[in-house]
Amino acid sequence: QVQLVESGGGLVQAGGSLRLSCSASGRTFSSYTMGWFRQTPGEEREFVATIRWSDGSTNYADSLKGRFTISGDNAENTVYLQMNSLKPEDTAVYYCAARYGAISTQTYEYPYWGQGTQVTVSS
């Protein structure tokens, strides 16, 4: 059974940085794609970034390019989301997700999800 555990969320001032981690277990993830999504109350979960383990290819939400960076440590089965120049509108619960196969930006294509970690950016 795939398990994903996020960590690293918290409270940060606008302009600050946070690094989220997602520890994955239960599979050999070499053929998997990992994604980060976020959700605010009353809104749909939205795509943030994704990375494919096999070749390190990445994709980002257009609005977040240049501020957020996704990376992975294959040996540790851990995916990171480095978030810089944070803004109050980045406040959300951030979720890690996994799927077998190619990169996708669609939430419905990810069958495995973590429990989420809260990120709050104060102005």
Image (tube, helix red, strand yellow):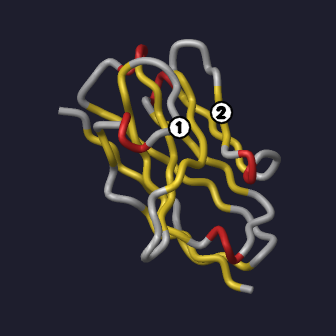
Mark 2: amino acid: Asn
Q: Disc 2 versus disc 1: distance between alpha carbons?
A: 8 Å
Q: Of all residues shown, which one is farthest toward the bottom?
A: 123
Q: Position of residue 20 (x, y in %)?
A: 55, 53
Q: Residue at x 67, y 45 (%)?
A: 61
Name the residue carrying label 2. 59
Q: Secondary structure at mark 1?
A: loop
Q: Position of residue 30 (x, y in %)?
A: 42, 15
**Circle nearer the N terminus (2, 1):** 2
Q: Is residue 75 above or below residue 2?
A: above
- What label does residue 114 carry, if any? none
Q: Is residue 101 left or right of residue 54?
A: left
Mark 1: amino acid: Thr
Classify residue 73 by image quadrant.
top right
Q: Position of residue 120 (x, y in %)?
A: 58, 76
Neighbour tally class for label 2: few under 14, some 14-19, many 20 plus, Cα within 10 Å: some
Q: Residue at x 65, y 33 (%)?
A: 59
Neighbour tally class for label 1: few under 14, some 14-19, many 20 plus, Cα within 10 Å: some
Q: Is residue 13 above or below residue 24?
A: below
Quarter of the image with the N terminus in it: top left
Q: Nearer the viewer, mark 2 or mark 1?
A: 1
Q: Residue at x 72, y 63 (%)?
A: 17
Number of marks present in the image shown: 2
Of residue 57 and residue 62, the one placed in the foreground of this image is 62
Mark 2 touches mark 1? (CB < 8 Å): yes
Q: Secondary structure at mark 2?
A: strand
Quarter of the image with the C terminus in it: bottom right
Of residue 74 and residue 41, the one placed in the foreground of this image is 41
Name the residue carrying label 1. 105
Q: Residue at x 59, y 73 (%)?
A: 91
